[in-house]
Image: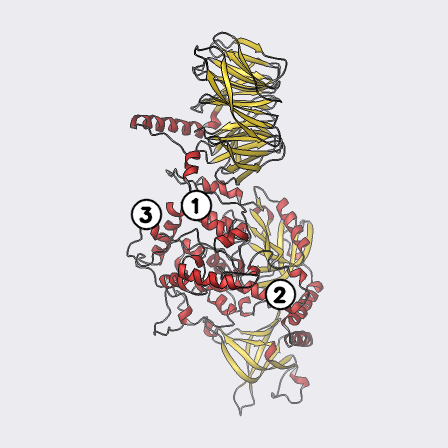
Amino acid sequence: MAFIRKRRQEQQLYSKERFSLLLLNLEEYYFEQHTANHVLKKNGTDRSLRKVRGSLKICSKSVIFEPDEISRPIIKIPLRDCIKIEAPEDNERNLFTGVTPGTISIISNQAFLTKEQNIIAPFKTERGKTEYVFELDVPGKVEDVIHALHQLYRASHLDKLGDQAAMITAILQSRLARASFDKNRFQNVSETLHMECKAEMVTPLVTNPGHVCITDTNLYFQPLNGYPKPVVQVTLHSVRRIYKRRHGLLPLGLEVFCTENDLCSDIYLKFYDTQDRDDVYFYVATYLENHVAEQAAESYMLQWQRGRISNYQYLLHLNNLADRSCNDLSQYPVFPWIIADYSSSELDLTKPETFRDLSKPIGALNKERLERLLERYREMPEPKFMYGSHYSSPGYVLFYLVRVAPEYMLCLQNGKFDHPDRMFNSIAETWKNCLDGATDFKELIPEFYENDSSFLVNNLNLDLGRTQGGKMVENVELPPWASDADDFLQKSRDALESQYVSEHLHEWIDLVFGYKQKGNEAVAAQNVFHPLTYEGGVDLNRIMDPNERVALLTQILEFGQTPKQLFITPHPQRIVPKFKSLSCASSRSIFMTEPPVSPGEESFEDLTEESITLAWNNITKLKLEEQHKIHKGAVTGIAVSSNKSSIFSTSQDSTLKMFSAESKMLQRSVSFSNMALSSCLILPGDTTVICSSWDNNIYFYSIAFGRRQDTLIGHDDAVSKICWHNDCLYSASWDSTVKVWRCVPEELLGTKKHFELVAELEHDVSVNTIHLNDVHTLLASGTKEGTISIWDITTATMLHQLTCHVGTVFDAAFSPDSRHLLSTAEDGYFKVTDVQTGMTISSMASEQLQRCFKWDGNTILSGSQSGELLVWDIVGGKIVERIKGHTGPVTSMWMNEQCNNIITGGEDKQIMFWKQQY
């Protein structure tokens, strides 16, 4: 659990003292501390003094005294309420007698008391003119402390907040400039220093200034005040992820993780200069091993679609990539309300009405409320917005978490809890208010889908007040279907991972992280928030007035921020097991057309599918059985007869070869012209081989008669690839077309065939490869300039034209379920495209070019430039096996239907036969 785990880490750091940075105001800094006594008069007539031992903290907007005695409260004296700050021995009107050197007198109209008996409760206010006298252990420090307090006193009494902030910033920068990182804190004397700069360590609601230092082995942060410990260290080789962050609307943040999946980072730093941030990022990233640095959302999308990661994990990754962090409550991770039923005694996750409509924002779920909001929106001058409050803000986060993070609520609300009736009292009431409330549109946080229920239970025995109905605010009231808080979370997790949510979660992602977040699509989806909440909604660097700048920043940070937009096209739907329908009927007919089958046929299909799955699970166990050098040039195509007895191959040497699998002998060699042949296939019935040629022609070779049967002169440039299905020939050419030809056979078998052109698929540049999906409704084409086009061949219309690659596309193929298209090109990348949306959902770089491949949707077998066969886990994004093969690039690959026999051809002029050996 992100926030609560972070909270417990901090509690361990702060265990020796009651003081916390959360006692400071927002945007306040803690500068230094001094061991001191708080000097008290015993009573009105007794002139003797009593001293309370403790620590005096000098902060940018207050002075805080923390007594050693736990029974005594911490005293916080706001500098803006101070009347006078001086050394008493220099004051003739000193109220005390017998004051020793080293004392400081602060006269104030107001002070706050907190943590008496170490109990977390709202601050008590001590009003009226009061003198507070502190005696420092080191008298010689008094002059420096008085000087510092006078500076800060003047800053706090400036009229405008911007002027106050500017003066405090100047004081802070002066202090940082006078200090530097203490090199004695290095773990090893042999460490080499790379860079040092000023920064602030960010934790929820507070930042702590200091110095960052990078060596060849460690990242260090040394707080200016030495709090909560003298130095924070992160070993570079333990770092697993690193992200640049937007903090305070500026590109100044950097978050470092030493875990793969945790939302809690090991350190979050805010720099004063973007270049410093980028330099530290560069140094840390270069030392990472198997790291994730600035991953794109597509790196997780395929894993989510294919069920490798859960809905919960995917949402965490998206939040992380969208600058959401548990260290920044103004950008805390946002999760959706999932369940809409909080009144039934049993929760039925099979009923759609149990769930919230994920295609709509919270503000659009209630039709009557939405009408009122839209009416106001239509009458509003520019810039318009539909919702006056956001779905995520620091106040909303702490609304949910007050029972485990009360000090954060007190920090945010100036030492007070919220009114008891406005507290998080009931799940059902909170949901109802989100549906009906005029200004309540909040979503949920990750804690609702984790396994720590403490945020729902008042384990700290906090006095959160009594409602108007006289009821004490204790544990959160749960719906009838939850037996206790743990059961509530378990059922919430079950709901999040349910089939309904898996089918519809992409709709909510479109609203929060995707293409419906901004612009016309947001207006159409009733998803428009205040313009200041969006990334880029305001450029702080262009606002020169410091007062306007501070006011604007405060407004934005308190109001909430919209996540960084991750997607600008519709997000793909998750692939749910046994779910074979898409969102529209036309898509169903294109993608998932499947003829009805009899029970017997179904059993056979299941058996075949099982054997294919087994084969792919053992694809790393391929063994080379034999190899034959039968060509004088690179092999460009391989086709095998249905009885597996004859292997046909084409080559850049312009020949078609027929090789006998039984005799291991070359049986025929045919040349149609002096130009290279680019591909070949065998027609059903094993009577005819078709070859495509660089001489612009397509040749038909009769196996029975051993001669050329026909020539199709169909293109104006080289024919690069051919496919065949159901009496239709598909030919791709460098003349920028893919042509579809229907075969009209003559009455006598084996005589010439007549072809009529039924469709011409136009491209802007040369087409290098094509592929048909398994149900023969879609065709993918790849060009010499890296574009991929997906066509509906039932209507000869283009569904998507995508700029996927840089350079020539070598190969492209649909997954068996037609959901995804894999392509590889001259740029060295494997890219997976979601067929329905056209979105690139995975991008994997290869150290060398991959010229050809076969895949099952999860695993790839590719032929590399080096001659190796590589087995890839595309979902995991890694190579799992390297198999030595050709002595040059692998240029062609054939695989049988059972996926356990493979034949490859290469530039080394050889064909190689591979078989799985279990």
Q: Is residue 210 left or right of residue 791?
A: right
Using a 10 Å C-alpha cutoff, classify the residue at mark 2 as few (fewer than 14 neighbours), some (14 to 19) or many (20 or more).
Answer: some
Q: Amino acid at mark 1?
A: Ser
Q: Tell me the residue that label 3 is attached to.
A: 350
Determine the residue located farthest toward the bottom in the rendered image: 45
808 versus 361 height, above or below: above
The front one of 498 and 719 is 719
Mark 2 or mark 3: which comes first in sequence? 2
473 versus 784 height, above or below: below
Residue at 60%, 63% in the rendered image: 208
**Residue at the disc numbered 1:** 310
Residues under labels 1 and 2: Cα distance? 42 Å
Does the rendering let one see residue 389?
no
Which comes before the other along the chain, label 1 or label 3?
Answer: 1
For the residue labelled by badge 2, is the local secondary structure a helix, a strand or a loop? loop
Q: Secondary structure at mark 3?
A: loop
Looking at the figure, which quarter contains the C terminus? top left
Mark 3 residue type: Thr
Task: Tell me which numbered mark, 1 or 2, is placed earlier along the sequence.
Answer: 2
Residue at the far left: name it: 345
Which coloring applies here? Answer: secondary structure
Is 612 situated left or right of 729 in this image?
left
Please name the residue that numbered disc 2 is placed on: 225
Q: CA distance from mark 2 to mark 3?
A: 56 Å
Question: Foreground mark, 1 or 2?
Answer: 1
